[in-house]
Image (tube, rainbow, N blue to C red):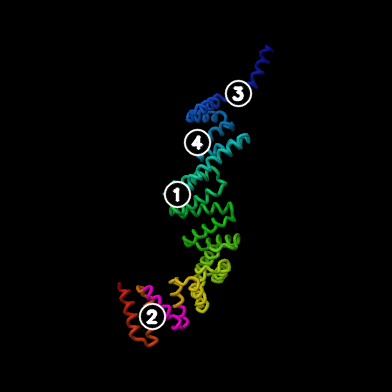
Amino acid sequence: MQYAYLLSLALIPLALGCQSSALTAAKLYLKQEETQKAKDQLVLALETEPQNAEAHFLLGKIYSGEGDYAAMDASFARAVDLSPKFEDQIDQIRDYYWAREYNAGVNVAQGEEVEFDRALIQFKNATLIRPERLEAWRNLAYVYYQLDQADSAISTYERIVSVDSADASSLHSLGVLYMNQDRYQEAAGVLFQLVETDPRHLEGHINLAVTQVRTGDYKGAEDNYRKAIDIDPQASNTYYNLGNLYWKQEDYTAALKAYEKTVELKPDDWDARYNLAITYLALQDMDGALPLLEQLAEEMPDNVSVWKELGRIYAHKGKIEESKRAYSLAETLQAD
């Protein structure tokens, strides 16, 4: 009886050291490349041994090969929680599939035949595989935008900047998307964060100024237009926007200078030349406006506003026939 008792004790550690038959079978099936059978066995193994890190790891590998990255991520996360043994292998697998999905997305998003629907799938997969890598999230947001899914693009950019508050590109894109939805207060907050992060960001200052005009912060808008001019003194559009701001405040002298600078930098800017002419009229300077409007009438003979203003100036100068002709042309164009 004593001998039998000792024999029984000796069998206990031997049983504890054995691998489950289901896990053993799964490994054999994997060697034979019978992944479905291996998966079935791993599921059975985890029913009896839910704390088995190796079973979770092997199941994650199978999911990765099937492209089920959400399930892969869950299995790998569980394996690492249970044991650090598989961390290096998991990192290698994640890196491999992340690169494969990310590069596939880039290829179809910028190839000869752009396929944003396919790119969307690839970049989504990449974010599941490596959620911490922001490159895929940035591209995912861009693809959402290209597919006119603005809300999804916004939520994706919001996620990016919550992780990296200094990501200038994402901050700017998010600000512009807010502007497109008339969410100017939110846009101003994001764009202010952008120019604080990157004080030399030209588009950031310009778009922040635009949002400030919309929210009634004219002083802030002027300051940001001026900062944009300091960054790029040759950016004609900044002077044009500044002129519009001054016009809105009825500061016609300042508006005139801004429009003059716009035309100096970009002589073929039709809108700037027209606004310059109208500003001359606001300052009661018809002699300054007349040559501009006459030139515009030659270039854009179908523009009703130009002929109306010319008719008014000619009448004021006593050029009755010219005035009648200008008004007649304006009426004809307006009727058409």
Q: State the residue position of label 4.
A: 65
**Local secondary structure at mark 2:** helix
Q: Nearer the viewer, residue 248 or 268?
A: 268
Residue placed under numbered mark 1 in the picture? 111
Would you call the spot at circle 4 few (<14 residues within 10 Å), some (14-19), or many (20 or more)? few
Q: Which residue in the structure is indicated by mark 2?
A: 310
- N-terminal label among 2 and 4: 4
Separation of residues labelled 3 and 2 (CA atoms) = 99 Å
Q: Which badge, 4 or 3, is on the more N-terminal residue?
A: 3
Q: Which residue is mark 3?
A: 18
Q: Real-space Cα distance between discs 2 and 4?
A: 73 Å
Neighbor class of circle 1 (other Cα within 10 Å; few <14, some 14-19, many 20+) is: few
For the residues labelled 3 and 1, the Cα–Cα distance comes to 53 Å
Element type where label 1 sits in the image: loop
Indicate which disc, 3 or 1, sits on the residue closer to the N terminus. 3
Q: Amino acid at mark 4?
A: Gly
Q: Which residue is at the far bottom? A: 318
Chain part drawn in magenta: 278-300
The residues tagged by marks 2 and 1 sit, at their Cα atoms, a distance apart of: 51 Å
Q: Which mark is first along the chain, 2 or 3?
A: 3
The amino acid type found where label 1 is placed reads Gly
- Between marks 3 and 1 in the image, the one whose residue lies nearer the viewer: 1
Determine whether the residue tagged by mark 4 lies in a helix, strand or loop: helix
